[in-house]
Image (tube, grey):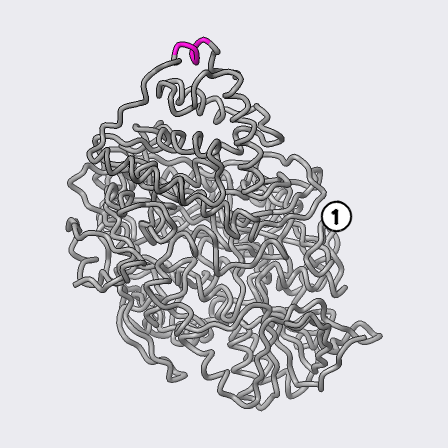
Amino acid sequence: MANVSRRAFLQGAGAVAVALTVPGCDRLTRQVEGRRASYSFFSADEAAFIEPAVARLIPADELGPGALEADVPVFIDRQLAGAWGAGAGLYRAGPWRAGQPGQGYQLPFTPAELFRKALRAIHEELARTAPDSFGALPTADQDAYLQALEKGGRDLGGVPSEEFFASLLELTVEGFFSDPVYGGNRDMVGWKLVGFPGAYANYYEFVDQHGVAFRRPPVSLGQGAGEVG
Amino acid sequence: MSNRRDEVDAVLIGVGLVGTVLGRELTKAGLRVVGLERGEPRNTVPDFQGPAMHDELRYAVRLALMQDASRETVTFRHSPRDTALPVRRWASFLPGTGLGGALVHWNGQMFRFQDHDFRMRSHTIERYGKDFLAPELAIQDWGVTAAELEPYFDRFEYLLGVSGKAGNIQGRKIPGGNVFEDPRSRDYPTPPQKEPYGSALFRRAALELGYHPYPQPSANLSQPYTNPEGMRLNSCVFCGFCERFGCEHFAKSSPQTVLLPRLLADPNFELRTGCQVLRINLDDTRRRATGVTYIDPRGVEVEQPATLVILGAYSYNNVRLLLLSGIGEPYDPRTGKGVVGRNYAYQTMSYPQVFYDESVNINPFMRSGANGTMIADFAGDNFDHGPLGFVGGAYIGEIMTNGRPIGFHPTPPGTPSWGSKWKRAVARHYNHTSTVNVHGSSVATRYNYLDLDPTYKDAWGLPLLRMTFDFPENDLRMSAFCTEKTVEIARIMGGQLVAGSPRTRPYDVTEYQTTHNTGGAIMGTDPATSVVNRYLQSWDVPNLFVIGACAYPQNASYNPTGTLGALTYWAADAIVTRYLKAPGPLVSA
């Protein structure tokens, strides 16, 4: 706990769970229960960190749902449980050395191994220092904890915390903006936020209508991408 | 114990652009040809079809069409003093694999290098004097001129059906085209693609400053087209899924859409996919190739004898196979001697952005891979370098290719990388931002080069290629100058804020820049400083031709594929009309 004082956590003890100012809270509760039942990679302890963490990376706010409501944890879970998590496309032969800036990822871990190690270390650390689960802390304390991970220089079971944080943030953005067939971007909320129309196949009649606001609802692979026009 | 197949007239290593064109030209000349492709067979139908192809995560992020780095990658370091480490995940550049090669997943940006690019050393000395060349520069002439290549540029553009507007037809300058281009014999086969909004804003700003904007030449076609091979292409519909994707619409020129079906129908041609070539075999004199050895899809080692060998894999894979086969003297940066691996170069990119107010809908998702507007006023030597102290330049253009949101969600400088402020900025700017590309040249230097890694191996137990590279001083100065010029244009494109900074060191292999890796098996006029002669024929082994962007002595401001297509037809023509009649060196050493 380099940057978040123990006192900050104690001050947060007993804080009520953060009230989500999103419409449809009942639905959200049901959604959370369904999500937890569907995890194939995350343990309950791991999910208890990942879910509130992604909710801070992309929060629900007046602009609409955030990463948690978009089922980003489900996306991350499936990615880590699948071929990518097992290191598909990752060169994995040693010897292993720390690289210089610009030489890229040089840890011996697959993404799944990296998450498992880092999440275990985070769980143990929080169990020692915080009286409540990560999700029960005030959001300012959650943010401070995530910022400390991001800043780096801390060891999470062999994983530098900045590597873990960068990977978590990257997966969160992927889960928010990838096609819903991968489990995140539920109801295409990420695409609706920015106005990306998804998997449409044809803008021939629109491209030279300069400045036209394209307001059609997005289309996902699961729906079958249609032609526009 | 190797399985030995019957000898064929020619064997192709790689069936992408080079393999497809050479296969076609050699079988038409009556040769029996075998094409060895390490990847999978694939075609527009069924492999590239929608809606499945419109999947950013699978293709653009997880790189489904790219080489599997778990089996074969490169190692990388910034200088000979450093220890190279494997590029464990592709990012800065994305080598493809599979039938059709990189021309399946390219953006279709189709240029001709200019005459001063081909004669960079002699041209620079002629214009600025010998003292102008900084000691770090290892730039060389190519041994060909734009005029010699013109018929081959023309042929390649008509094969692809390129959409564009000429700026110089037989010496007649045409406003609205690239007035800096060397004379072309005729106009492009199809007119330019439609101009998107951000590109139109760039065009007006560039005109206001007195520059010469023109539509980027595109291999995503503006209208239906039937090429000289009888292949029919469709109009591009601006779906925004070009680079890193196959085109489902038959609108992007690729081997599959312009030529490959003709080759595959030829009884003189045999395609073998899933075949990983390990080496080119030589006879005892080491002056003649006897064929190649490869691992077939079942894992069995096979020897394929051939009278003629065409090495047409991706740029640096060509270099690696030469080194693994012991062909040509490896380059040594300590002595400056040797040839194989010298003059590795890249591309020097920067990307200023214009942030608009919310009334300006840029609609970044309505694009093709090559339908922007650009200027060549600062490309190559199209401007006076005398007072500037560098060589080379950049083309500058609003040539955005897509609005896929995992990769594209621009925010102004100073925005946090997560949290509510980030989310608000992403929502605010996604549809109201233009990116202007500064597509800069890359000089060769003594210490940027390729060799075999002493430590790391591929899945077949062979040494990986080692890349030693960082941006030369010359190119940092070039980038600073051209980026500043770009920001001046961007400031009058009507936005509220312009952000942009030039390329800096160190080179970062985790940031996508371009897949324009050049050099390492360069062409030239002197066997002491080049691997192949002006016809891309090996100086050491005359029945071996090495065709790829590995032949470029340094990289120019323009995307390399158009020039590679021209060189491919140029080499094919020399093989068919001269070499086959009298096999031997086409240029005496």
Residue at 55% over, 80% down: B23
x%, y% of residue A100?
A: 62, 34
Determine which residue is flagged by label 1: B455
Residue B439 vertical position relative to residue B266 in the rendered view, above or below: above
Q: Quadrant of the N terminus of chain B?
A: bottom right
Query: Left or right: where does residue B488 sit relative to residue A168?
Result: left
Relative to B270, residue A210 above or below: above
- For the point 26% across and 72% down, the residue is B223
Q: Is residue A106 above or below residue B233?
A: above
Q: Nearer the viewer, residue B79 or B256?
A: B256
Tell which of B397 and B239 is nearer to you: B239
Give residue B403's position: percent from left, percent from top. 31, 50
Residue B193 appearing in the image: yes
Q: Is residue B399 visible?
A: no
Q: Quadrant of the C terminus of chain B?
A: bottom right
Vertical comparison of A136 with B161: above or below: above
User: Where does residue A86 sit, x and y in percent of width and height?
Assistant: 56, 48
| Chain part drawn in magenta | A7-11
> Mark 1 is on which residue type?
Thr
Query: Is residue B310 rendered magenta in the image?
Result: no
The secondary structure that most of the magenta stretch takes on is: helix
In the image, B463 versus B461, the foreground residue is B461
Question: Relative to B431, is B554 on the left or the right?
Answer: right
